[in-house]
Amino acid sequence: MADERSPLEAEIRRLIAIAGPMPLADYMRLCLTHPRYGYYVTHDPIGAAGDFITAPEISQMFGELIGLWMAAVWQQMGAPENVRIVELGPGRATLMIDALRAAKTVRSFYTAIVLHMVEISPKLQAVQQLRLEGLGEPVLWHPALTDIPGGPAIIIANEFIDALPIHQAIKQADGWHERVVDVAPDGKLVIGAARDPLPHFDGTLPRELRQSPEGSIFEWRSDAIALELGRRTRSDGVALVIDYGHLRQGLGQTLQAVAGHSYTDPLRSPGDADLTAHVDFGTLANSAEIIGGRIHGPLSQRDFLYRLGIEKRAAMLKSQALPDKTAEIDSALARLTETGPKGMGELFKVLAIADPKFGVLPGFEK
């Protein structure tokens, strides 16, 4: 059995033996960002050869529309001579490459750009450096958004927040208990509940959830990223968040693990699968607004892409494509805008946070 365990599982078991059951948020953080064994440290996860595919990998249309959106926002900002284009979790840099190709059509914007990539994965940073070096744009890498100098900025976070650690609590007879990872008597990792209830937890819940029945699960994230986005954008800044999630707080757990393009047990082989959970866009918006950012949206990815003209872009690509490629373009359009609870067009939401002095941002017009 010991030989089947991942190196990170051995480390997690050691920590549990020393300090007791581990909060789920700590487990998720270790699985993704442990300095030696974390998933994002050891894997190149995106694309057909990886574990999952993001919207930029589905079609160039996605990144191109984001690039034109950034150019329009820059003009709305007053066309500053130096603007920081920041991407959080750039993946294989596909979004930024497509975005900047489209942005070249607004030459004054293109020449004002300095790229800042926020990336913790050495493997992905190497890929990004290789793919971005031919653009002729200065590129800087940072481990965190807080490391980027102040000044006019456009921040893009596509499928970034879903990978930030979540806490969970479960309602029991004596109150809400934080969910933890522990070692069961049979030796397996399991998710259980902390022995003592969280103090005064009911008071932190939305009023409609305070009388939840036993067994209910409530999920939340630290508001650190939302507060930082609000702080960075309240003076000459705009942030665009695209991710899968829900519009308001509710009950239920959304933690999931993906490996090899299939769902797997989050406790199986820690460090070898991508762990994510839905984004609570309502709470994200409230936290960013409290610190001074103006909120635009959220709205569905489908509505946002249609408002930016994805149908026209698809038609243009089809007019220039070989006949055997037109079906591929139609398929990509359908996948990016598909409705239904599991369709990307509906499940994914788009939220912008901006300096209050800016008007309504492109794509968010009522």
Image (cartoon, grey):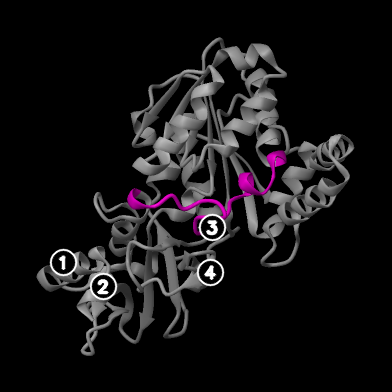
The amino acid pointed to by label 2 is Arg
Is residue 150 at least partly visible in the picture? yes
Mark 1 in CB contact with mark 4 (< 8 angstroms): no
Q: What residue is pinned by disc 1?
A: 15
User: In terms of depth relative to the viewer, which is nearer, 281 or 183?
Assistant: 183
Residue depicted at 53% across the width and 22% down the height: 134
Residue depicted at 28% across the width and 73% down the height: 181
Q: Secondary structure at mark 3?
A: loop
Residue 45 part of the magenta segment = yes
The answer to whether residue 190 is above or below residue 112 is: below
The amino acid pointed to by label 3 is Phe
Task: Point out which mark residue 262 bears.
Answer: 4
CA–CA distance in space, label 1 to label 4: 29 Å
Task: Point out which mark residue 5 bears.
Answer: 2
The answer to whether residue 40 is above or below residue 85 is: below
Q: What segment carries the magenta color? A: 41-61
User: In terms of depth relative to the viewer, which is nearer, 56 or 281?
Assistant: 56
The amino acid pointed to by label 4 is Ser
The amino acid pointed to by label 1 is Leu
Q: What residue is pinned by disc 3?
A: 52
CA–CA distance in space, label 4 to label 2: 20 Å
Left or right of 318 in this view: 6: left
Rate crowding at label 3 as few (under 14), some (14 to 19) or many (20 or more) other CA atoms within 10 Å.
some
Quarter of the image where one finds residue 346: bottom right
Q: Secondary structure at mark 1?
A: helix
Query: Which one is in front in this view, the residue at disc 2 or the one at disc 1?
Result: 2
Residue 290 part of the magenta segment = no
Left or right of 142 in this view: 257: right
Residue depicted at 34% across the width and 41% down the height: 122
CA–CA distance in space, label 4 to label 3: 8 Å
Upstream in the sequence, badge 4 or badge 3? 3
